[in-house]
Image: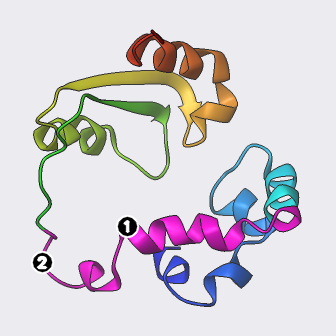
Amino acid sequence: MLLFQLTPEGEAWVTEEHLREWAHHPDAAAVHTELVRDGSITPGLNYYRANVPPAALFGPPIELPPIAVPTMGVWSSADFALLEEQMAGSAAFCAGGWRYERIDGAGHWFQWEQPERTNALLLDFFPAPA
């Protein structure tokens, strides 16, 4: 998937079938319909294109400064794309504070699968408005 995200063929690759089969999205049909309707396939892929330069896939790791603001990492126990060790290890890059939360029983799209739990974590993490 990552190579498709970084090439012009990426847009053609994002189909309902791929969202269902590769990404295991719980509502692939609705997501694909929305991506096509509002033209957000390219902007969605541009997020990855901006954050992962192609050279990073084949060269030494990119040296980045530590994250200076408080950061929360949320990992779900059935995530097919991210290991818990990867998420928990992100603490090493967070100089401004790190909070780790685990959501059991959800996959990669935990925001869709457990929105109440996700929102509760976000509301607890972000400061209340003044």
Foreground: 112 or 49? 49
Identify which residue is drawn at 21% across, 41% down.
90
Magenta region, residue range: 36-62
Amino acid tagged 2: Pro
Tell me the tag on residue 32: none
Identify which residue is drawn at 11% across, 40% down.
92
Tell me the tag on residue 51: 1
User: Is 117 included in the stretch rendered in magenta?
Assistant: no
**Label 2, on which residue?**
60
As drawn, the residue found furthest toward the bottom would be 8
Identify which residue is drawn at 25% across, 78% down.
56
Please tell me in which quadrant of the rendered image residue 75 appears: top left
Mark nearer the N terminus (2 vs 1):
1
Please tell me in which quadrant of the rendered image residue 85 appears: top left
33 left or right of 101 in image = right
Percent coordinates x, y for residue 110 in the rendering: 58, 33
Amino acid tagged 1: Asn
| Mark 2 nearby-residue class (10 Å; few <14, some 14–19, many ≥20) | few
87 left or right of 26 in image = left
> The C terminus is located in which quarter?
top left
